[in-house]
Each structure stands twice: as C-alpha cells, then as structure tokens.
Image (cartoon, helix red, strand yellow):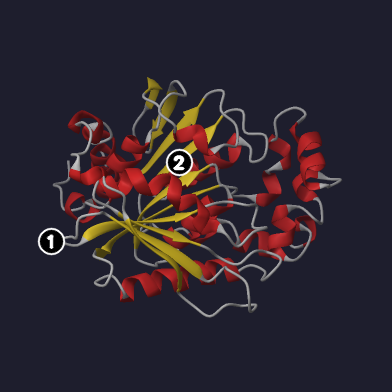
Amino acid sequence: MINRSLSRVLALTALLVTTLGAVVAAGPPTSAATRPPRIFKNVAYAEAQPAGTHGHLLDLYLPAQPATTPRPLLIVMGGSGWFADDGKGYAPALAPYFTAHGFVVAGVSTRSSQQAKFPAQVQDVRAAIRWLGANAGRFEFDPGRMAALGDSSGGWTALMAGVGGTGVRAVVDLYAPIDFLRMDEHMLPGACAAFNRTFHLDACHASAMSPESALLGCPILICPERVASANPLNRLTPAAPPVLIIHGTQDGLVPLQQSRQLFDGLAAAGVPTTFYTVPGVGHNRNIVSADAGRATVRVAGERLIPDAAHPTYAVIESFLRAALLRGEASSLPHR
C-alpha cells in the first residue's frame, strides 16, 4: 500500500508531468501578447557592496499590456562560475517568451566571489526576493506565485533560494553544481584538462583557485564543512518547492552526475521533481532551444520516460504553471 506522504508526492508529480505539454498544445500567443515587454532597468534591491559594483541590481520585464490581475513572477539568474556580478543578463533571452505568455520576469544579479564570499550570494538572492515581494503590486505580479530559474552557478543560486524558505514556489535548474567534493570524480574523459586550461588551474574543481574554492574562500578539499553548507541538498526539507532539472550528457564543466545526485536527493525527500537528461548537449543555455533533439525524463516516484520531447521554453512554462498550483494539488485525495 502506498503511504500517505508517498501518495501525496505521486499526486503532485503526476500533476507536473501531465501538464508538461499543455502550453505547446495551446499554440502561439496572440499578436497583442507579442509586443515588446515594458522594461525597468538597473533597479537597486539593496545597497552596492562594494561601491560601484552591480550585484545589487535587478531588471524587470512586464508584459506589454497592463495586468488586470496579478501575474506569476519568474526570477532569472545567469551563471558565471560566481566570477561575475551580472547574473541579470540572462533574463533578456527569456523575457520575450515568458512575458508574451503572461509572466513578469525579473533578472537578478548577485555579488561575485571576488566581491564577497559565500554565503553572501544566498543573502543577496534572499534580499532580492524580499524586495520583489514588497514591490509586487507596483510591478503587477503575485508575490505568492514566484519561481526561480538559473543556469550553472545561477541554477545553484535558484536552488538555494528554493530550499531556503524564501517563498519561491518552483525552481528550474539548468546544470547547476551541487556537491563540490564529488565533481572531479565524475568529469568526462579529458574534461578536467580542458577545465584547467579554461580557468588556468592545476587540479580541476579541487584547485585552490577553482570557481567553487573561490566562492567559499578556501580550497574545497580543506574546508568540507563550508562545502557541505553550500550543498542545497543539506538544506532540503519536504516543504521545498518542485524542481525541474535539465542537464546535458556532454557537459564538460559540471558533470551530469551532479544533477543525478540532486534528483535522487529531492526524490528521497519527497519533493516533486522532474529531470531531463539531454543527449549530446554540453554546458550551454541552448539546452532549452527548440531544435536540439530528444531527451530522457525521470520523474520522482514514477518512472523513466525515454525519448521525451526536448525541454523547450514551453515545457518550462508548463512546469512552472503546474508547480505554482501546488497548493491546490496538495489537497488532492490520497489513494
């Protein structure tokens, strides 16, 4: 017999999977919805620290037509190995699609590892979410329907926001690093040599100057406690929001095994989770382009689905809409 908590997870994950194709079937947006979004640039959600830097800024993209009811909000953070404070620069790629489909989009920057060490980046995204919640009415979105999306280190930031009790109700993670101490053992053949050349390192992710060591302010091999604190799975509770994971099989920077660990940990905690493994794709935001082939999908508590549709923007939108209905889904009857 399925116990009550597992049954609840199955009901929630079933809702997420069932709706993955709904937006695709709905067809393109109307001509009115394809107008350029209204944009608010370089809005400060906190004071600049240090002065003159940009990790305290966000941009907002609103649908062209003013809202009659509050819209959902998608918070977007781009990755840089934590070496840059321009994470909001990923949002322009996503804003045209998501504003045309009724979302407000916020591109959020956090401080780089050169400007502040962990947990400063987590503190930054929390501050941004607090600011957004306090200003939701001004920017026409519902503070109870906020989701976060990021790639690489931006995906890590989105996950840390999701497991941190910030009010984020869905997370989309594109190939984020999770367990820093286990990255090197799962790197693709030859990938560490290329990684060392790219970042001018001598010991792959274990190097004292690797992105992960720079974030923590210590070589990861000698500060395992800080590494553990930076692992989203170590902050996880069953109350965490649903997570959509997307990772390419040819990722030469963050090994695919990192997302497998994340999926397994979320599933074990009873968090509704969907995992797209995309063959032949590396560490690249085009992983969600419409023409990159097929993918394999795993769903927490369910089954492996081979040869599923590629995770396009429409698939992400469907996941977000289903996840933002989680409150209604949690009231489904138990089997």
Question: In x, y percent, where is residue 292?
Answer: 47, 24
Q: Does residue 59 appear to the left or right of 181 in the view shown? A: left
Name the residue at 54% across, 53% down: 154
- Toward the viewer: 154 or 269? 154
Numbered circle sitting on residue 212:
none
Q: Secondary structure at mark 1?
A: loop
Q: What is the count of numbered marks?
A: 2
User: Foreground residue, 14 or 160?
Assistant: 160
Q: Could you tell me which secondary element the residue under label 2 belongs to?
A: strand
Q: Which numbered tag is attached to residue 68? A: 1
Which quadrant would the C terminus be assigned to in this image?
top left
- Residue shown at the point (55%, 65%) measured from the top left: 110
Query: Tag 1: residue type?
Result: Thr
The one nearer the camera, 78 or 188, is 78
Where is residue 285? Give x, y as percent: 52, 39
Q: Are marks 2 and 1 in contact (CB under 8 Å)?
A: no
Residue identified by numbered label 2: 245
Please say if 25 is above or below 5. Answer: above
